[in-house]
Amino acid sequence: MGKFLKPGRLVVMLAGRYAGKKAILIKANEESTKDAKFPNGLVVGIQRYPRKVTKRMGQKQIRKRTTLKVFIKQLNLNHIMPTRYRLEESTLKEVRDRIERVKESELKNVEKRKDLRKNLRKYLAEKYRTLPAGSLADKKAQSRFLFSKLRF
């Protein structure tokens, strides 16, 4: 059986504070490491999703309603469920570049982490605002799945 937990896969968090939230798998370590004694992965997810926007709303209100809240977390791979969706390569490359600018040792630093979250929030919010209209069957519009709240 091939590896299906590859970078760019959209996943659903199953455990902890962010259970039920959607995220992007950035790195997946199938083997345990010195820091984590279990298979682990780095995810970037959406903690607070954008809200509905209508035609009657002004630009200021639209901008406020389309803001997101982002989280970055290293976790056990058993605590995520992969979906059939993948993020397009250009978006994944941009998110990965922004994360790799910060060293892994600096990810434990609260201030660096906060700056990274702010940076990713701005990028993902802009990506959401410029999403193409279309169904999820379209490869370009598959990132729409990431920005919609999980309903169950």
Image (cartoon, rainbow, N blue to C red):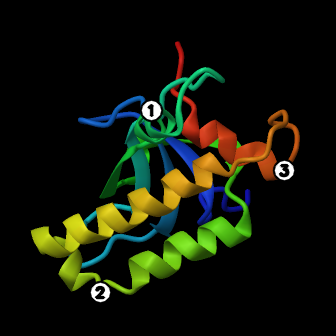
**What residue would you read off at disc 1?**
61
Look at the numbered disc 2 and give the secondary structure of its residue.
loop
* Percent coordinates x, y for residue 138 in the rendering: 88, 44
| Alpha carbons under labels 1 and 2: distance apart | 36 Å
Residue highlighted by disc 3: 139
**Residue 68, picture quadrant:** top left
Which structural element holds mark 1?
helix
Name the residue carrying label 2.
103
Residue visible at 48% across and 69% down?
A: 27
Within 10 Å of the Cα at label 2, are there few (<14), some (14-19), or many (20+) other Cα atoms? few
Q: Residue at x 40, y 76 (%)?
A: 99
Whether residue 78 is situated above or below residue 37 in the rendered picture = above
* Among the two numbered marks 1 and 3 on one chain, the one whose residue lies closer to the N terminus: 1
Residue type, mark 2 in image: Lys
Mark 1–mark 2 CB contact (< 8 Å): no
Q: Is residue 68 above or below residue 87?
A: above
Taking the view exactly as shown, the residue that stands out farthest to the left is 110
